[in-house]
Image (tube, rainbow, N blue to C red):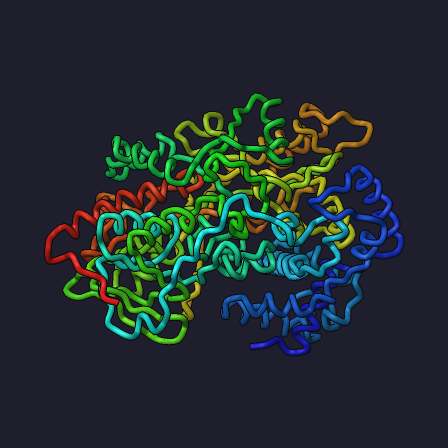
Amino acid sequence: MALTKDQLDTLAAIADTIVGVLSEKDQAVLSKNALQHYSKVTVNDVAPFSDADTIAGYLQLSGSVHRESLSDTIARAPKRGQQSLKIVLNLLSSRVGTFILTGYTKPFKSLTHQEREAIFLKWKDSSFTALVSLYKVFTGMSMVSVYRDPSCKVHPAVGYPVYDPIRTAPDYEPPQPPKDRIKMLTLEDVTANELHFDVVIVGSGAGGGVCAAELSKAGYSVLVIEKAQYFHESELELSEKAAYPALYEENGSLRTEDGGIVMVAGSAFGGGTTVNYSVSLKLPYTVREEWAKKHGLPHFISPKFAEDLDRVYERIGASTEGIKHNGPNQVMINGCRKLGYEVYDVPQNTGGNPHECGWCYCGCVDGVKNGTMNTWLRDAEQHGAKFLDRTQVLKVIIKDRKATGVECLVHGEKKVRIHADRVISSAGSLHTPGLLRRSGLVNSQIGRNLRLHPGSIIFGFFDQPINMHVGSIITSCSQFNGDLRKDGYGLLLEIPTISPSFLGSLLPWRGAAKHKESMLKYRFASPLVPLLREYDSAGTVDYDENGNVVLNYDLTSNDRKKLVGGMVRTLMIMCAAGAREIHTPQLGVEPFVFREDEEIRVDNSRFQHWLKHVEHVGLPTKDTLTLVSAHQLGTCRMGDSPFHSATRPSGETWEIKNLFVADASLFPTASGVNPMVTTEAIAIHVAANVAESLKSPSAHATAKL
């Protein structure tokens, strides 16, 4: 349902408040400062050069001119979210509603810019959760809508290229010849005859891809069903405007119900492995030991699991060879070394090949990143596996408490039943619980125990350009464990890639002028994010009447304290690396700025006082800042009892025979490291158990196509 004129006018007025035209005085000051900053930038082939005209164009920009992008953002939101936003927009379109929410007697769009800005700043500092949520939702939505528009004037002003300037060049040659397309079944293929496979796998990511390869190589007929559309490498578009709607859940803006955590989750052929940052970390032995001893899963400390981790490394080409650290990675390395923190290179799944690409989140045009689309799924195809994209599995068909196939909606057009001797759900922690519930499973652990590795992004602004959008993304990391907690529940420090839309939406908004001042220093910014291995925090995955994911997550006081400790250490690292200005995501903490006459050092008395303030403010509630997450784990965890887990140690569900799970939802706890390698190693284990169950002659079927 489209926005009414009043709703769109109000939304445009909100965007004009957040990204507003500045006064002539503010324009003059910010333009002068920005030009002084950008005089330090050398013109090169990876970004346009900012000048007085482009900077002036941005300072005079009103977010209201991007009405189409604003409307599109609303249209792409889940229906439940759309309805809530429209109710608020209706209120702000009327005198009475505006008075209730703001105290002003005119409709929001009729207020002056100064009055509208004062409203948002009041909401930011409000003690009412609902008003803080309005502040966060509308500031974030405005940034994403305006700054993801390729025509937005912020891009030339800050030197952001919008599209990968190297791989979109007309004469660009990929480092290796492109592979042939993976053939997808058509609607006609699946409706012409009744289909029967040995194994149907729901999902093509780290779990599904490995199971498809292992089982097809073992001689079984395999069908992989993926809800997302298949894109060949040559069809991937390296821009966030195109990538997020095509390759992510909810356009890359999935949130918990209270808005406290923003998540990115892949929804692509190849799952998260298509859009992740190439990070290939093995599961630490302390975690393996915990899973074995506390959850009754001895497989994780067996030589076999260690061998499976090595197998994964070999197949995906995980190596530290060829690594070249970009600006933000070097910032972290420098800061950690000065403070004595351990820092190490992160293995990349690129076969040891140099891959200085900051656009991994859009998929890998070069075909160098060895996600499942480039490895395990290719293996499966070579051994006869079939693939069906753009297809939602509605439920698993169950007869006599055994899985016998799936019912699915093919290409959004027709319901089809496909028979199978075994079904594997590899739909991920967000969707495997939904599939199991829709299929009639009632185990109380399904959809519980959600772990997120929540993080708080810290930004430092430097005197010299950092160019956080250029080069490999995560090539180094550091851990805080022993000094925060003794049992492996610490934090992992990593570096995300940050576009202007993310910088704008993650920095607390403190007025249009301060916002634009920070944005103009985009190329001088560097991000660091401490990711928490939560100990006793957990969440749930549910679904609304339209099937959309509903996430709730509670961060306990114990884990809040630990995350704040990680934030303080991260701030110290940023300072030690030479950041002149440092921001936390806390709404109640102003950024720290070293004066021009001050030496930038951690023992600066003002800085130490500020750190104490950061720690004092802490995280009283998630409303005081926005946390981020890229890892969703544990919602169908495996274990030794149906009272504490959703699946057996084999990956088979407790309730239904021949129905297995193989994805990160199996994790008994948070892993503490990026989950891809662990998920793939677990999938080898699950696939072996599926194969063992199929060895009886009556179970082996030939695919009928």
Image quarter for residue 704? bottom left
Q: Quadrant of the C terminus?
A: bottom left
* 337 horizontally vs 111: left or right: left
Image position, residue 544 (x, y; %): 42, 67
Q: Is residue 505 visible?
A: no
The image quadrant where one finds the N terminus is bottom right
162, 494: nearer the viewer: 162
Q: Give the quadrant of residue 147.
A: bottom right
- Residue 523, image x and y in percent? 71, 42
Looking at the picture, does residue 349 appear above or below residue 217? above
Q: Nearer the viewer, residue 100 or 69?
A: 69
- Which residue reaches farthest left? 697
| Residue appearing at x 62%, y 33% in the figure | 571
**Residue 657 horizontal/vertical position (percent):** 18, 56
Give coordinates of residue 379: x percent, y percent. 34, 48
Viewed as shown, does residue 124 lie left or right of 442? Answer: right
